[in-house]
Image: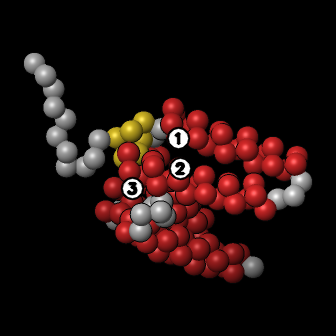
Amino acid sequence: MRRIVNSIFIVLGFLFIGLGILGIALPLLPATPFLVLAAVCLAKGSDRFHRWYTATALHKKYVEPAVNKKEMERGAKKKTLLTLCLIFSISFLLVPVWQAKVVILLVALFHVYYFTFKIKTAPVRGEEIMIDE
């Protein structure tokens, strides 16, 4: 049974890597949340695949800054918030129960607050920070 569960986590990990790579290219799909999910799934599924994934440039560029430094580039933050707002808006419109709508609204507001005030905006890679002297 454990082998089946590990296999499922490995498949999910690679699926999330694929979605993360698509998110790099597509303007509305965020890359970072999918790549973080890939790291979690691969860690649960296989030590070997997790070590491989954490050594990739993809992980170092998108996951490590978000997890270790709690920072994201401005474009990545915008894409993530846009996607979350779209998902929460669709959920809000489709759910008929007003109590569920309140919960969806509160969760959406928390996400906006968290990404706006708790996750720092990192400078774009390759961009020099100018300091006036």
Q: For the residues carrying marks 1 and 2, which lies nearer the camera in this image?
A: 2
Q: For the residues carrying marks 2 and 3, which lies nearer the camera in this image?
A: 2
Q: Which mark is residue 30?
A: none
Q: Is there a contact, CB below 8 Å, between mark 1 and mark 2?
A: yes
Q: Residue at x 61, y 57 (%)?
A: 86
- Measure the alpha-carbon separation of dots 1 and 2: 7 Å
Q: Secondary structure at mark 3?
A: helix
Residue beneath label 2, please? 81
Quadrant hosting residue 87: bottom right
Residue beneath label 1, please? 115
Q: Is there a contact, CB below 8 Å, between mark 1 and mark 3?
A: no
- Measure the alpha-carbon separation of dots 1 and 3: 15 Å
- Measure the alpha-carbon separation of dots 2 and 3: 16 Å
Residue type, mark 2 in image: Leu
Q: Mark 1 or mark 3: which comes first in sequence?
A: 3
Residue beneath label 3, please? 62
